[in-house]
Image (tube, helix red, strand yellow):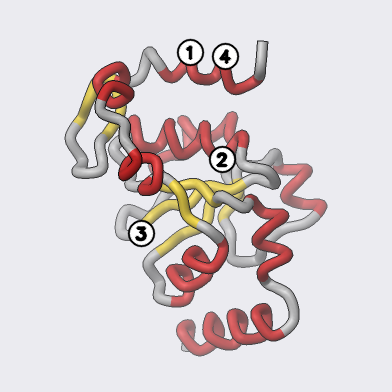
Amino acid sequence: MKPLSGALLMLLVFSCTSVFGEELPFGQYLSEFDYFARKEMKIDSEALVKGIKEGEIQLIDIRFKEEFEAWRMGFAINIPLNELPARVKDLPKDKLIVTACPHMDRAILAMAYLRTQGIDSKYLTDGLVGLAEYLRGDQARDFINKKSKSRQ
């Protein structure tokens, strides 16, 4: 069995929140799933960085603690996937939540779970590996400078 197949079965027991915040049974959400919904659940590194600069997005790194300690994005909050249900109350209510892991598999699960809880969320399509690649050189300097100015 593929890893996501079991996870998708697990999601069938949850309700799901539509783009407009209406609670929907997961089966109904799937029946109404279209190209707009597919696009709406994703965000790339460029849009993520722009949203963080503007104070509209919070990045949640859902890797295990040891992975996060080995290397991290200094502007992300670490909430491991297996701790997410217990820590969902720790998430900011006034920001879009973007979930991320190196390659998207856990981030997709986290995003789906958060949506079942009525939390506006997306997953990072290029993963933390892609974000690290995006934030190199001038991009990194400009991002850090903008973040530093917004804190003052």
Residue 95's disc is 3
Q: Which mark is residue 133?
A: none
Q: Is residue 82 left or right of residue 13?
A: right
Q: Residue at x 70, y 39 (%)?
A: 64
Proximity of marks 1 and 4: CB atoms separated by less than 8 Å: yes
Q: Which residue is mark 1?
A: 9
Single out the mark in the foreground, 3 or 4.
4
Give the mark toward the camera: 2 or 3.
2
Q: Residue at x 72, y 58 (%)?
A: 72
Q: Position of residue 78 (x, y in %)?
A: 60, 49
Q: Earlier in the sequence, mark 4 or mark 2?
A: 4
Q: Earlier in the sequence, mark 2 or mark 3?
A: 3
* Contact (Cβ within 8 Å) of mark 2 with mark 3: no
Type of amino acid under label 2: Ala
Q: CA distance from mark 3 to mark 4?
A: 30 Å
Name the residue beneath numbered marker 4. 6
Q: Position of residue 126 (x, y in %)?
A: 62, 53
User: Looking at the rendered structure, which numbered label has been put on residue 107?
Assistant: 2
Dot 2, crowdedness within 10 Å: few (<14), some or many (≥20)?
A: many
- Asked if the residue under mark 4 is in contact with the one under mark 3, i.e. CB atoms within 8 Å, the reply is no
Left or right of 152? Residue 63 is right
Assess disc 4: are there few (<14), some (14-19) or many (≥20) residues with their C-alpha within 10 Å of its C-alpha. Answer: few
Q: Are the residues tagged 4 and 2 within 8 Å (C-beta)?
A: no
- Direction from residue 5 to residue 130 in the image, left or right: right
Tell me the crowding category of disc 3: few under 14, some 14 to 19, or many 20 or more residues within 10 angstroms, Cα based. Answer: some
Viewer-proximal residue, 152 or 60?
A: 60
Q: Secondary structure at mark 3?
A: loop
Q: Is residue 122 above or below residue 140?
A: above
- For marks 3 and 4, the one nearer the N-term is 4
Place residue 28 in its image quadrant.
top left
